[in-house]
Amino acid sequence: MRLLETALVLNSEDTCPAAELKKLQARNEKLRAEVTKVENAFADYRHKYEVQVGLITELGQKTAEIT
């Protein structure tokens, strides 16, 4: 009886390698989506930073011309 219970647990859909693989693949997809989201946000902030640096540089040059 104990052997049968062990076999049922080992063959359970939740513990079989295929089910574990599916869970890991789903988690991997979620993480990839999160990485893409972070990369896009980073690119957006980097662009905004570069624009800001350009504006500050231009402001400094204009201020120097005026004074």
Image: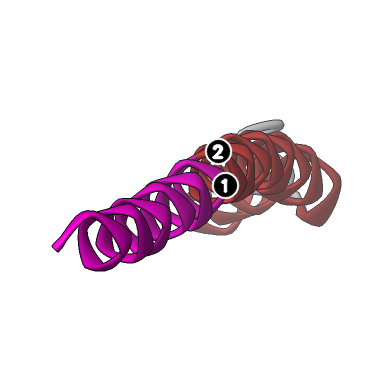
Q: Secondary structure at mark 2?
A: helix
What residue range appears in magenta?
45-67
Dot 1 alpha-carbon crowd within 10 angstroms: few under 14, some 14 to 19, many 20 or more: few
Label 2 or label 1, whichever lies nearer to me, is 1
Tag 2 and tag 1, C-beta contact below 8 Å:
yes
Residue 9, quarter of the rendered image: top right
Q: Residue at x 58, y 58 (%)?
A: 3
Dot 2 alpha-carbon crowd within 10 angstroms: few under 14, some 14 to 19, many 20 or more: few
Measured as percent of width and height from the top left, residue 2 is found at 46, 54
The quadrant of the image that shows the C terminus is bottom left
Q: Is residue 18 magenta?
A: no
Q: Residue at x 61, y 41 (%)?
A: 27
Q: Which residue is mark 1?
A: 47
Q: Which residue is mark 2?
A: 44
Of residue 12 and residue 17, the one placed in the foreground of this image is 17
Q: Is residue 53 magenta?
A: yes
